[in-house]
Each structure stands twice: as C-alpha cells, then as structure tokens.
Image: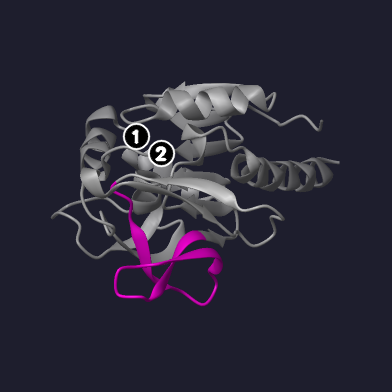
Amino acid sequence: MEALNGPVGVLALQGDFREHIEVLGRLGVRARAVRVPRDLEGVSGLVVPGGESTTMSLLLDSSGLLGPLAELVTAGTPVLGTCAGMVLLASEVLDGKPGQHRLGALDIAVRRNAFGRQRDSFEADIAVSGLDVPVHAVFIRAPVVERAGPEVEVLAEVAMADGVKRPVVCRQGPALVTSFHPELVGETRLHEAFLSSIRSQTRKENVRAL
C-alpha cells in the first residue's frame, strides 16, 4: 500500500475520536491524536469526529487549534468529517449558536440535530455514489445538508420526515463529510476514500518535489 507523507491527525478534543483512530489502524495507517497545535505538524490529513459541535467549537478556542485548523483547511489538506465534524467543516450552520465556528471546507449549509433528539437515533443502509454495496449508517442526533453549493458533489441522500431527500454525504475537493458515524459499525470504505484523496495529493507533492 502506498505510504503517506505523514500521519493522519484525528481531532481529539471531544467525541468519538478513538473509534476513528482504531479504523485507521485497521487500514494500516498511522494516526495521531490532535489536542494542541503542535500535534498538527506534518499531518497528511485530518479527521474531525462526531461529538457535540458547540462544545468542540469552544474547545478549538481554548486549545489554540482554531487558527491552525483554519490554515490547514485553507491549504487544501484532505479532511474527513463525521456528524459533528460535518457541522464544523461546513461554511454555514443554519441553527448554530452565536459565535459557533465554521471551518468552511465545503460550501454547504448544515442543520444540526435534523433528525431529532437522541431517542430518534436510527440505523439505515444507504446507497453512496461510487460504492457497489450500501453503507450501514448510524445516525445519532445527526445533521443534514440543507444547501450544497455548485462545486459540492452529493454522494448520498436520505428522505426526511417531510418526504424530501437531503444530502448526508458530500465531497468538495479534498474534503469529505458524512451526517452519520461509519466508524461505529466497522465501515471503512469512506475512510478509504479519504485516504485515497491523501495519497493522490501525496503523489502530486512528490512530483513537484522532483
């Protein structure tokens, strides 16, 4: 398997970062828990896990990570965001709290807890563009995409209570986000797609270095 130029960082301020580290380990990839700015040095990509998006936003301030993460996203480093990670990587949060941070990796408007409260959590098999077999998805107080910009590729949708299908997997350039938690059920294919994006960028960087 093609090596990466550096470890994959996993934002480890709050949420289910351990599960992402375990998935990356099963895929043979070195992962690094990111808690302070120096943990970002040399990372080849970044995972932003599920959790509580407003709490994570506050912790980005107290940890000093907000600025370095914004620079990383602006530089085009590949990122994967699941559930709360989707919220943090969005350009707009429709029902966010005042001062809630948005890293703007994708031109999407997201609504938090779009499917309801914790008791409304559910699992479903959903078709994802590019994958032959549906993904078993776990939705826990999940967000949904209400608007996707023209450069955003919608890879999967789910019908809401009003009968309208809305995006739950989106990609824009090196950024991939999901409303659900693939890491909780041993699903690795979305992580593999994220790693493919890193390897593609690594090849380009190595060619430029020649």
Which quadrant is the C terminus positioned in? top right
- Residue 201 is marked as none
Outermost residue toward the right in this view: 210
Instruction: Verify whether residue 143 appears in magenta.
Output: yes
Mark 2 falls on what kind of element?
helix
Q: Name the residue under label 2.
A: 68
Q: In this view, does 154 lie above or below 200?
A: below
Measuring from the top left, give residue 83's x and y in whole percent. Answer: 38, 47
Query: For the point 54% across and 22% down, which residue is it?
Result: 22
Q: Do the residues labelled 1 and 2 touch (CB within 8 Å)?
A: yes
Q: Is residue 123 left or right of residue 1?
A: left
Q: In this view, does 47 lie above or below 179?
A: above
Q: Mark 1 points at which residue?
A: 65
Q: Residues within 10 Å of mark 1 (few under 14, many from 20)?
A: many
Query: For the point 59% across and 60% down, which residue is it?
Result: 127
Q: Which amino acid does label 1 sit on?
A: Leu
Measuring from the top left, give residue 191's x and y in whole percent. Answer: 60, 40
Q: How many numbered markers are drawn?
A: 2
- The CA span between labels 1 and 2 is 5 Å
The stretch of residues the image draws in magenta is: 141-169
Measuring from the top left, give residue 132's x and y in whole percent. Answer: 72, 55
Q: Is residue 165 above or below residue 116?
A: below
Give whichever of 183, 80 is nearer the camera.
Answer: 183
Mark 1 falls on what kind of element?
loop
Query: For the point 82% across and 30% down, which residue is it?
Result: 1
Q: Which amino acid does label 2 sit on?
A: Pro
Q: In this view, does 43 lie to the left or right of 98?
A: right
Instruction: Verify whether residue 123 appears in magenta.
Output: no
Measuring from the top left, give residue 130's x and y in whole percent. Answer: 69, 59
